[in-house]
């Protein structure tokens, strides 16, 4: 089945294809403007939502609440520090078998998955606490 996309969705996909890193909707909006595409920020969000629902883009939400968008790629998993925001990619993936089981058991169409661990990196652990006693 051929997916019908809007012109805005196609323009966004072209930008994402040229990037080798995830990007926020706001930064994507700036990039589109720099490439002379006249598209409002609300249109960027609507287009990203449609692309997300068809599995054409993946979303990673940071501990700050900011969402980063990219083309679907191999599974990406991270250790993310809640204090400094550093994010360390990890290669191990303990959920591939679970994904297959969930698909079989629930007939759920899985586009991708993410695995995030949140805590404190070694550098932030060694800093004195700034919270009041």
Image: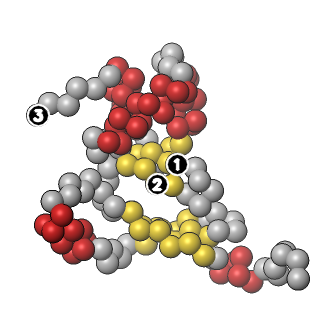
Residue 2 visible somewhere in the drawing: yes
33 in relation to 105, above or below:
above
Residue 60's tag is 2
- Front-most of residues 19 and 70: 70
- Front-most of residues 74 and 96: 96
CB within 8 Å, label 1 to label 2:
yes
Q: Earlier in the sequence, mark 3 or mark 2?
A: 3
**Residue 18: x and y, percent?**
40, 37
46 in relation to 93, above or below:
above
SS at circle 3: loop
21 in relation to 13, above or below:
below
Q: Which residue is mark 3?
A: 1
Quadrant where the image shows the N terminus: top left
23 in relation to 99, above or below:
above
Q: Is residue 1 left or right of residue 13?
A: left
Q: Earlier in the sequence, mark 1 or mark 2?
A: 2
Which colour assignment does the render follow?
secondary structure
Residue 55 figure quarter: top left
Q: Residues within 10 Å of mark 1 (few under 14, many from 20)?
A: some
Q: Which residue is mark 1?
A: 67
- Label 1 and label 3: CA atoms lie apart by 29 Å
- Front-most of residues 129 and 13: 129
Residue drawn at x 36%, y 28% is 9
CB within 8 Å, label 3 to label 2:
no
Q: Residues within 10 Å of mark 2 (few under 14, many from 20)?
A: many
Residue drawn at x 41%, y 46% is 70
Q: Earlier in the sequence, mark 1 or mark 3?
A: 3
Q: Is residue 60 left or right of residue 120?
A: left
SS at circle 1: strand
């Amino acid at each position: 089945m051929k997916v019908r996309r809007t012109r805005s969705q196609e323009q966004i996909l072209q930008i994402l294809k040229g990037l080798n890193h995830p990007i926020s909707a706001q930064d994507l909006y700036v990039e589109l403007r720099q490439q002379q595409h006249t598209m409002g920020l609300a249109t960027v969000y609507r287009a990203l939502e449609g692309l997300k629902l068809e599995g054409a883009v993946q979303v990673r939400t940071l501990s700050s609440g900011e969402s980063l968008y990219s083309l679907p790629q191999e599974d990406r998993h991270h250790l993310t520090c809640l204090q400094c925001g550093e994010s360390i990619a990890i290669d191990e993936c303990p959920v591939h078998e679970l994904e297959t089981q969930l698909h079989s058991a629930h007939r759920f169409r899985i586009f991708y998955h993410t695995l995030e661990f949140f805590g404190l990196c070694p550098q932030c652990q060694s800093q004195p606490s700034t919270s009041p006693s």
